[in-house]
């Protein structure tokens, strides 16, 4: 029997994702719900509205927890209607000590 192993990110590895979510994602508690989910998962970073109607976010933390949060952004809170989620892998920096909602454009 031959067993193949795929390289998989270990849960304990730190990662950073830069996410852009489009659709009906403003005015539906998307950022606040993202903060609540991030706090529950222990993921750090921020989320903010963009002037073009999207939500932008940075997520840093344990690989599996960040992945769970990224998956959640693909549907968001019940009032949202996510049409697209763009995800960019970035180098982990470790610059955050919590998750915040930003109110700047």
Image (spheres, grey):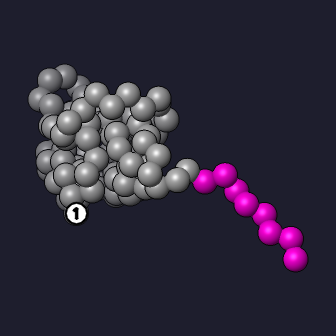
Residue at 37% in and 54% down: 65
Q: Is residue 50 above or below residue 40?
A: above
Residue 4 in the image, given as x and y percentages of width and height: 78, 63
- The residue to which callout 1 is attached is 78
Residue 49 in the image, given as x and y percentages of width and height: 21, 33
> Residue 71 is drawn in which quadrant?
bottom left
Residue 63 in the image, given as x and y percentages of width and height: 44, 49
Q: Number of labelled discs?
A: 1
Front residue (pair 65, 24): 65
Q: In which quarter of the image is the N terminus?
A: bottom right
Q: Mainly helix, strand or loop, the magenta region? A: loop
Name the side, left or right, on which 14 lies relative to 25.
right
| Magenta extent | 1-8
Q: Is residue 78 above or below residue 20?
A: below
Q: In this view, does 50 lie above or below 13?
A: above
Is residue 3 a member of the stretch shown in magenta?
yes
Considering every residue shown, the one lying at the far top of the view is 105
Residue at 23% in and 26% down: 51
Residue at 70% in and 56% down: 6
Q: Quadrant of the C terminus?
A: top left
> Residue 31 is drawn in which quadrant?
top left
Residue at 35% in and 44% down: 61
Q: In this view, does 52 lie above or below 27?
A: above
Is residue 7 a member of the stretch shown in magenta?
yes
Graded by Cα atoms within 10 Å as few (under 14), some (14 to 19) or many (20 or more), the crowding at tag 1 reads few
SS at circle 1: loop
> Residue 101 is drawn in which quadrant?
top left
């Amino acid at each position: 029997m031959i067993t193949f192993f795929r390289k998989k990110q270990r849960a304990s590895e730190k990662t950073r994702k830069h996410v852009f979510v489009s659709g009906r994602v403003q005015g539906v508690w998307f950022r606040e719900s993202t903060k609540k989910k991030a706090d529950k998962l222990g993921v750090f970073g921020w989320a903010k509205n963009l002037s073009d109607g999207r939500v932008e976010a940075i997520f840093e933390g344990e690989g599996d927890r960040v992945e769970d949060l990224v998956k959640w952004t693909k549907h968001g809170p019940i009032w949202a209607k996510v049409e697209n989620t763009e995800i960019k892998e970035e180098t982990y920096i470790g610059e955050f000590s919590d998750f915040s909602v930003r109110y700047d454009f």
